[in-house]
Image (spheres, rainbow, N blue to C red):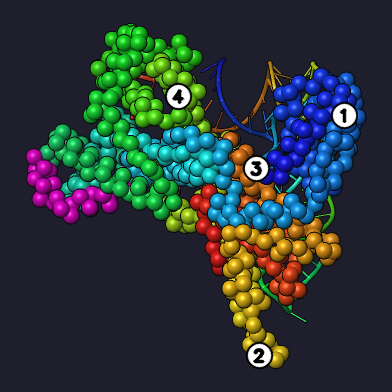
Amino acid sequence: MIKDIISKNLTEAVNLALKNNELANIPDDEIQKLAIEIPKNTEFGDYAVNISGFAKFTKMPPIKIAQIISKYIKMDDAQINVVAGFINFKLGSNYLNNTIKKILEQKNDYGKITFGNHEKVNLEYISANPTGPFHIGHGRWAAMGSSLANLMEFAGYDIHQEFYINDAGNQINNLGKSLWIRVLQELGKKADFPKTEEEGAKNYYPGEYLIETAKKYLENNKEQAEKSYKLFPDALNPSDEIINEMSVFAKKEMLKKQKQLLDNFRVKFDCFYSETSLHESGEVEKTFNFLKERGEIYEKDDAQWFASSKYGDDQDRVIKKSDGSNTYLTADIAYHHDKIKRGFDRLINIWGADHHGYVPRMKAALAALGHNPDRLEVLLGQLVNIIIDGEQVRMGKRKKMLTLEELIEDVGVDATRFWMIIRSIDTTLDFDVNLAKSCSDENPVYYVQYAHARACSILRNATSERFDQETKKELAPFIESEKFNSLINSEKFDLNNLSSLWKKSDENASKATKTLILKLESFEDLILNSAKNRAPYMIARYVQELASDFHHFYAYSRVLNVEDNLMIARLSIVQAVKQVISNALNILGVSSPEFM
RNA sequence: GCCCUGGUAGCUCAGCUGGAUAGAGCAACCGCCUUCUAAGCGGUAGGUCAUGCGUUCGAAUCGCAUCCAGGGUACCA
């Protein structure tokens, strides 16, 4: 990375200046902190470093310090100039050419870094109840989570993607009870969902999606259902056996649908972890006893309490209710305990902001179990507003809602994913359905994909036969396929291919070319920063900027129909752009079309 | 009340481990298609970075207070 080269030279220069007593009193960690940045105003240079921070140690004006340091910098093929407290670097073509070489040699691996050091990370996200279709909010976690997984893999982590199935508790019974009503309705019996709170309306799922499930159930179980109905004609009071049968069937169907949708949405989990399995294996009880042995649990009001406030939670939490059953928290503690026992160095959870109060108690739980709570990282995502026709649509949870499936059908996987990722996780996302659907300038997905398709088009044309309109004759391609392939696909890219790139041509073209290559160069740095910050949205922003730089380049630099050496050089750049756009879009789980 | 996010251009948002003139996209206005994809490019205009005080050589960025918006504050999951 060019930044690393500059950084190394800079550190050496500062140390030399210190050794020669031209500077003094600068602590080592201050030198380490020097950040190479890209100036907002590129007139200053391609890279810059601000050394004003040294002023308070050396008691010298920043400009003086910058001058002294710059004297000691020995970089070939780079211009260095000092403005105020800044040392600016303007790079020569060697650096830029090497960037292209690196991309063409590393291909799909360009941008991969070893920062993560193979740390074993368990990334848990979505973790929805299997009681209905995903809503759009789940879509944000799905897109975020899978992109973050791709990103962190790229940055050198070992990522294990996990979905925790919340398949225990009353909700599953409620699901079964609701399915039974739908089944009876399908059989033509009189059966209705309760309407009022007194009748227990909130214990049912009246969403229409269970109608389909009911039909499916009846395909093979019609007689059985009729029989059950005769024994228990009251739709709201079926037997436990019926509820159980319905619950199991509904859960299985819902899960199947969820998995199918995730597959369509390019979300790949390594593991679906069932909460029920934790109860059945006795892990929940074991964890409870373990905590009890460690003295973290006490009794009050007939319930068992976890003393989470000892570990920073603002109050203690019930862990076993007075009726003897466990709370959700108990299973969740067991689950996180299990993750750590499975050998993960780090646990990352993506949770909706509505769960933020849950973070301290989960961290407290880890501490109480004897683990370092910092191993758990919770990324809190703000919620999603749906905008249709300029109006915000409220998401009623159990009423009619726009499901993720409908959205994807409407908008497409690429656009949905891109829009879900484009904003930082800290801001409430306004998802404008009309905008995401629109194939216009307003839609950044197509802007980026168009750049990729455009690059592909140029590369295609370069090796295709041509037809001359005037002479009505077939012309040879601009470059033979074989030559082109050896240019693009060889293990060792020949830097001489780029030699004619920087000969004096028009200024706009070389400026655009340089800007473009510097953007390509910054990809590795981007991976580092976005992985560090767990921020896939940075990739989405970057790839838009890259597309913009490429379109700009395209406007000023003809690739084909110029003299051969220049064509080869520019084709190499186009290929590199195509590669990097596709590497970036791959991380986001967005496709890179060859035609549009 | 307490806790978590956010408040930056007409709109949606970057920038926030303090540093050069606060950026992008869209919308508005003006231009550019007989040559590689116009789903594109160039240009113009648009700001008291919610408010106040503080820390600092220097604050959109850090601290405190206030005001707005969203979310949370269960022996639900």
Q: Which residues are magenta?
A: A208-231
- Residue A62 horizontal/vertical position (percent): 87, 28
Give the foreground label among 1 and 4.
1
Mark seen at residue A473: 2
According to the picture, the residue beneath numbered tag 1 turns out to be A65
- Whether callout 1 and callout 2 share a subunit is answered yes
Q: Secondary structure at mark 3?
A: helix
Which quadrant, please, contains the N terminus of chain A? top right
Q: Chain of mark 3?
A: A
Q: Chain of mark 2?
A: A
Q: Secondary structure at mark 4?
A: helix
Predominant secondary structure, magenta span: helix
Give the foreground label among 1 and 2.
1
According to the picture, the residue beneath numbered tag 4 turns out to be A358
Residue at 89%, 34% (x, y): give it.
Answer: A67
Specify whether residue A227 is painted magenta. Answer: yes
